[in-house]
Image: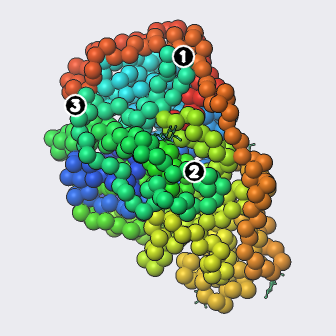
Amino acid sequence: MKLAGILLGTVALIALTNAKEQKKPNIVFIFTDDQDYQLDSLNYMPNVQKYLVNEGTLYKNHYATIAICCPSRVGLLRGQYAHNTNITDVSPPYGGYNRFNTLKLGDDYLPLWLQKSGYNTNYIGKLMNQYSVNNYNDPTPKGFDYQEQLVDPYTYVYNTAVFSVNGEAPVYYKDAYQTDIVHAKTRAALKRVQAQDDPFFLWVAPMAPHGQFEIGDDGSMKTSSPVPAARHAHLFKDVQIPRTPHFNPETQVKTASYWKELEKLNATLVEEFDETYRNRLRALQSVDEMVGTIFEELEKSGELDNTFVIYSADNGYHLGQHRAFPGKCTNMEEDINVPFIVRGPGVEKGKTSELVSAHHDLAPTFVALADGDQYIPSWVDGGVIPLTKALKNHRKPVSKESFAVEFWSDYQMAENYDNMQVKGPNTYKTLRVISEDYNYMYAVWCTGEHEFYDLKKDPYEMNNLYDQANIQLVNRLDALLIVLKSCRAETCRDPWRVLHPTNKSVKTLQDALDEKYNAHYTQFKTVRYEECMGYYDAANELPQIGQHFTANTTKRHNDVADQYVLKSLRKRSNEESKFILPKEYHDLFKLVPESSKSVGHAVPDENFESHALPIDDKLIQNPVNWAEYNFYGFGN
Ligand SMILES: *[C@@H]1O[C@H](CO)[C@@H](O)[C@H](O)[C@H]1NC(C)=O
Ligand SMILES: *[C@@H]1O[C@H](CO)[C@@H](O)[C@H](O)[C@H]1NC(C)=O
Ligand SMILES: *[C@@H]1O[C@H](CO)[C@@H](O)[C@H](O)[C@H]1NC(C)=O
Ligand SMILES: CC(=O)N[C@H]1CO[C@H](CO)[C@@H](O)[C@@H]1O
């Protein structure tokens, strides 16, 4: 008895000592807005290269499963697909901060799970659309020990930095460059959290390289190129958008309704797009400097070796590929494949990984790093990305090689070009399957049109093989899409369990292609929409899991009713495309003054917070429905 007691005591003591020595790792998450992976933006970021790519692992196959800000961010915060959060747009009624709260999504999400895991949680920068001067404390976002968010309608104005700190009335920083304030706040946050005992989670979300928001003298709202800090405005004069085969092609090879009417871009537009591309790279320089500061601070405090630093973006971006005007929201690689770089204890250095992962995997992965698996609700769709050896055998791994990408919209959002927002429906389900042996993109549009690209042979999506592809392959892809477009929790991580309930060894497309399953795959209904809708109604998106069997058939389905496409094509008239902000609202907007001189010459010093000024109370007291005037019409 006595001996056992002593032994137990010793074990407890050893456990205690170990716990003290092995402080849980810190997590710093750098998250940009609209940054591409495909168009080489990372190559223009020397600190990202030096501290992250060279010292960590670059994951080439990491994806956003919906290519627009609010739905992507909420999906990430919750570890879910958009079809499970039902935040499918940037603004009301199908998206935005108010809906996020009405649906109670902020009552059970990443920051709360990390707090339960013992973390001091911090947020700096853009949280999500419609978090504004009117609802910043209605409610204050839950789960953050310290938070400093950008507020609308100033979020996308580079030279007007307006933040709410811990749910207090917003303040602004006169004549300051927004990314530099995010930078200065990040430096201050690192000093603050490193002085504490608890491990910390710091999410830094600069708005760059998102487009700039502007109100014309007549009250018209529009976006334009990002505005670089003054010190970076001269850079990259000779740089151009990569002239890949799908950049503004001579013939339009993408034939789905969304694409087929796009005209070849003239030289003036191409030059404008190139300048936007350069301004994106310039705006990213301030982010890159901040990355440098983050590593210097971590090094100084001795925390670097016990910190995971992760870099990503909410969604990608395209400029001119397949003749598209600048923007996001499509299912092509430029919009969905995002930067994902990880450095930290146990992460391989200087490595490039082909592992497939998606944004809904990040929350469970961060919580696994924080040793808090028990706080991950069972409804979470994502799995744990094997960033380290310790995470390799996690009992909830990521989906092995496949995921779905989805979108719901009635029109294209061409940024900077309001009058080009004319094409009808942008509602689709896309399947991506990526392994060493194959790399497929398969899409079903609400119009009934299909796309199928073999990205191993055709990385630029130039050759839609849907009509020629082996029907046995198409069968499998469509069946897999049935599951992933409606999956929840476990079925998102292992969709094959739904398709092969009695054979657990079918784990990949390769396994399922075995010809002994040919008959099996004739039994499935095919993915289709009842009609083109701009939001998620489950009854419109067929078939649902559980009702996916039909009479045997091997037909290819391409029931594009041209008539139907035309019926739902919603051209914006010129009149409709001009949204004029009434003068009284424009005057409210001007209550935070524009900078009076050129800004962005240097990152502010440590005393910058003493320059914060309160915003006029009239702004807070007069709610404006900015969405009504097209504030979010560019995917802001
Ligand atoms: C280029 O195309 C745009 C959009 O169609 C048009 O507004 C513009 O006038 C064209 N410019 C030239 C020089 O043709
Ligand atoms: C189960 O699937 C595996 C992998 O495709 C296959 O080798 C095996 O024969 C299947 N078993 C049955 C009973 O169909
Ligand atoms: C998603 O939200 C819309 C609009 O509020 C609603 O009509 C729809 O039924 C919801 N979808 C699901 C699957 O709950
Ligand atoms: C739903 C249905 O009728 N399924 C049948 C399709 O054909 C296979 C054999 O070819 C049968 O086993 C299924 O029952």
Which corner quadrant of the image does residue 161 belong to? Answer: top left
Q: Which of marks 3 and 1 is in front?
A: 1
The residue at which mark 1 appears reads as 218
Disc 1, SS: loop
- Quick check: which quadrant has ligand 3? top right
Identity of the residue drawn at 75% across and 50% down = 566
Q: In which quarter of the image is the N terminus?
A: bottom left
Is 578 left, or right, of 31 in this rendering? Answer: right
Q: Is residue 613 left or right of residue 549?
A: left
Please report whichever mark, 2 or 1, sits nearer to the chain's N-terminal start.
Answer: 1
Of residue 586 and residue 379, the one placed in the foreground of this image is: 586
Q: Which residue is drawn at 47% across and 25% down?
A: 214
Between label 2 and label 1, give the one nearer the viewer.
Answer: 2
Is label 1's Cβ within 8 Å of ligand 1?
Answer: no
Residue named by callout 3: 231
Sequence-wise, the earlier of marks 3 and 1 is: 1
The percent position of residue 250, horizontal first and vertical second, equals 49, 59
Confirm whether residue 560 shows in the render.
yes
Amino acid carrying label 2: it is Leu
The residue carrying mark 2 is 262
Q: Distance of mark 3 from mark 1, alpha carbons? A: 31 Å
Up/down of 393 relative to 430, above or below: below
Mark 1, Cα crowd under 10 Å, few <14 / some 14-19 / many 20+, is few
Taking the view exactly as shown, the residue that stands out farthest to the right is: 551
Label 3 is placed on what type of residue? Arg
